[in-house]
Amino acid sequence: MQNYGLATLEPREIVSSLTAVPSSTAYYSLTVPTTEEKGIKEFSAVEDADVAGIGTYSLEWDNKPESGEARIRVQRPDDGHCTILTIRSSRDLPVIRRIAYYHTFAIPWSELTALIADGVVLVQFIITCRHAEIPLLKHHTGVMYTTMADFYASGSASNDHEPCDRDTKLVFSDGNSLFASSLLLRKHSPYFRHRLGPGTEPLLLDGLAETMLDAESDSETSPTNLIAGQADASQSSAGGHIRNIILPNTSWIVFRAVLFFLQTGWISFAPPTLSTPDGREVRKRIVESFPTYIPGKPQPVSSKSVYSLASRLRIPILQELAIMHMVLNMRESTLIDDLNRPFFRRHEQMGETLAATIAHDRRSVVETEVWARAVEIAKSTNDEYFLKMHRAIQEALNPAT
């Protein structure tokens, strides 16, 4: 694969390029009983699957009625980089996808109810473990960080879009607009499944201002001339009724990247501007060079902005891709500052992921005087968020026997 926007950098600055190798896949089928009201009930199961040339993969399913979710853990015989979980039934819709850094998944029961038929959850699991080198950029200060994370579509060069009618017009406050398929939006987003149902009025996606325009999120708040953004009649399907969705305070550039992901499974994340002192300039160079080396695809976007939008649209697989990109870009010297940033405090799942990262990969941070001082400050100021993250880290480091 190509170097995804790094070609403007000197060759010596390229540490490695994204190289996809064949993934290992395990298949499971499982029947999960439900209550008479199709609710969650106590249930646990362990299923094994043999993958030729690799070994035995184990899937552990455990319903948690007290928390209203099912927990799934994948035990693998290798150390591949990430695990992608797909849950589906015989129905076309919906398909549940997750991506995990530590191979443990929590699925809310409210999502699984869509797969219930005749009082049971009939699902097929596909566990895909991908192995890939991550594209790294070496800054002149010696810092190395990733420039994109594309695990979901790793190794795929397909530009084919899902066949669908573009019967929905997405209108942005800056005057740009996009045409999309209501079927595509409903297939991948519970938000749109709810709001694009029969008899609904033109939609207003509100509540995004706080997250989408946060300066620390590296949000792209206005279009650039890198990609033509104005929708026209040729983009929509011939004939039929066009429904309008108004998206105030939403970045057209970010939404276009998300829409392209829903169509093709492909997305590119830009390096965070806080990675280096001149991070904004480095990021600008990568984004500007992107159309030259990767034509026909949306430019790299902020993983924080994508996470914020995916949270509102309830697209977990995209949230988790964004999380992984953020985690891979974190440096040990700034982990405490990262944990305290408003973005992580606002999104509790992000804070929990960062805590898990510290416990599994950066545990030496917890042993420093700086960390001890941060805990003391949190106690003296009754900072429940930081103390909660600290307890989560300690529990991960010292699991109950």
Image (cartoon, helix red, strand yellow):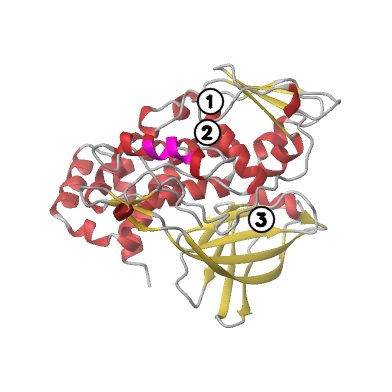
- What is the distance, in whole Å, between disc 1 and disc 2 at their CAs? 8 Å
Q: Position of residue 6 (x, y in %)?
A: 40, 47
Q: Considering the numbered disc 2 on the image, is that residue within a helix, a strand or a loop?
A: helix
Question: Of the residues shown, which amino acid type is indicated by label 1?
Answer: Thr
- What is the distance, in whole Å, between disc 3 and disc 2 at their CAs? 36 Å
Query: Which mark lies nearer to you, 3 or 2?
Result: 2
Q: Position of residue 39 (x, y in %)?
A: 70, 52
Q: Which mark is residue 40?
A: 3
Give the residue drawn at x 59%, y 40%.
296
Instruction: Give the residue pinned by disc 2.
Output: 254
Q: Nearer the viewer, residue 32 or 28?
A: 28
Q: Which mark is residue 250?
A: 1
Q: Considering the numbered disc 1 on the image, is that residue within a helix, a strand or a loop?
A: loop
Marks 3 and 1 close (CB-CB < 8 Å): no
Q: Main secondary structure of the magenta part?
A: helix
Q: Nearer the viewer, residue 50 or 381?
A: 50
Marks 1 and 2 close (CB-CB < 8 Å): yes
In the image, 313: left or right of 361? right
The span shown in magenta is 285-290
Mark 2, other Cα within 10 Å: few <14 / some 14–19 / many ≥20: many
Question: Of the residues shown, which amino acid type is indicated by label 3?
Answer: Ile
